[in-house]
Image: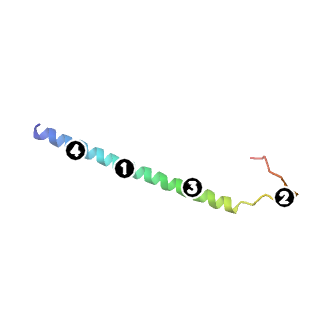
Amino acid sequence: MDISSVAGSSLLYRAEQTQQAVSTSMMKQAAEQQNQVANLLAQNAQQAPQPTSKSGNSFSFSTYA
């Protein structure tokens, strides 16, 4: 194996490592964004008004979406 082959292999390996680091960073960022969305949905669910009973155990739910 000559020096140019070793150098080329080394550069290719380094490029692959860089690509893997970028991919890992992007996955981490996506996970953090999903976590933020989940937290916002949880807060929204806590702030949403609870259904009230009209008579006894029957509840009235809106089907309008």
Compute the Cα span from label 2 to label 4.
Answer: 69 Å
Q: Which amino acid does label 4 sit on?
A: Leu
Q: Which amino acid does label 2 sit on?
A: Ser
Residue assigned mark 1: 22
Image side of residue 65 versus residue 26, left or right: right
Residue 32 at x, y = what percent? 49, 56
Secondary element under disc 2, as helix, strand or loop, is strand
Residue 5 at x, y = what percent? 15, 38
Marked residue nearer the N-terminal end (2 or 1): 1
Q: Which residue does the image show at 83% across and 52% down from the upper left?
A: 60
Secondary element under disc 1, as helix, strand or loop, is helix
- Does residue 43 sit above or below 5 in this rendering? below
Instruction: Verify CB contact (< 8 Å) between mark 2 and mark 1.
Output: no
Residue assigned mark 4: 11
Compute the Cα span from label 3 to label 1.
Answer: 23 Å
Instruction: Verify CB contact (< 8 Å) between mark 2 and mark 4.
Output: no
Residue assigned mark 3: 37
Instruction: Verify CB contact (< 8 Å) between mark 4 and mark 3.
Output: no
Q: Which amino acid does label 1 sit on?
A: Val
Q: What residue type is labelled 3?
A: Val
Residue 4 at x, y = what percent? 13, 39
Image side of residue 46 versus residue 2, left or right: right
Marked residue nearer the N-terminal end (1 or 4): 4
Residue assigned mark 2: 53
Compute the Cα span from label 2 to label 1.
Answer: 53 Å
**Image quadrant of residue 11?**
top left
The local crowd at label 4, few if under 14, some if 14 to 19, many if 20 or more residues have their Cα within 10 Å, is few
Marked residue nearer the N-terminal end (2 or 4): 4
Q: Which residue does the image show at 87% across and 57% down from the upper left?
A: 54
| Residue projecting furthest to the left | 2
Marked residue nearer the N-terminal end (4 or 3): 4
